[in-house]
Image (tube, rainbow, N blue to C red):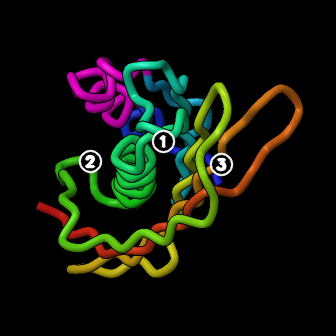
Amino acid sequence: MNLSPEIDRKIRKSFASQSFMASISARISELGAGHCCLTCPIDDGYKQQHGVAHAGLTFALGDSAAGYAALSLMPATSEVLTTEMKINLLAPAAGSQLIATGRVIKPGRRLVIVQADVHAVEDDTKNHVAILQGTMIPV
């Protein structure tokens, strides 16, 4: 389902104002009602000692993708905050880029249940490296 132009603009403006997302060169690659896909490069500065993306980068991208998926279903006057988020790391995040796909599982008036899948991409290979599940709250 498509977003209204008002909600689309709001989310893109909010994303653009996040200095952390800018610092990791993240961008919105897909945006729809209850859905958001974010990408970022796995630069050397974001790797841990084994040469793969740090779990903090994986978590941040997944959390933001899930949060914007939730925001896409909220009224234009709302903002969103994460109240809790769990991550399961499935494999080392080896590659040149991360892709986080957030989606709404159950929208509610007070709580929104979300998930995100994070994949690491290297050439033509896409490896599922994490799944997040959590709760967002409109503010």
Q: Position of residue 80 (x, y in %)?
A: 21, 56
> From what the image shows, is residue 137 above or below residue 125?
below
Q: Residue 91: x percent and y percent?
A: 63, 59
Under circle 3, the secondary element is: strand
Residue at x 46% of width, y 67% of height: 132
First in residue order: circle 2 vs circle 3: 2
The quadrant in which residue 10 appears is top left
Q: Which residue is mark 3?
A: 119
The disc at residue 77 is none
Q: Is residue 134 left or right of residue 30?
A: left
The answer to whether residue 75 is above or below residue 36 is below
The kind of residue tagged 1 is Ser
Residue named by callout 1: 4
Amino acid at the residue labelled 3: His
Q: Which residues are magenta?
A: 9-25
| Residue identified by numbered label 2 | 76
Q: Residues within 10 Å of mark 3 (few under 14, many from 20)?
A: many
Residue at 46% from the left image edge and 33% from the top image edge? 5
Under mark 2, the amino acid is Ala
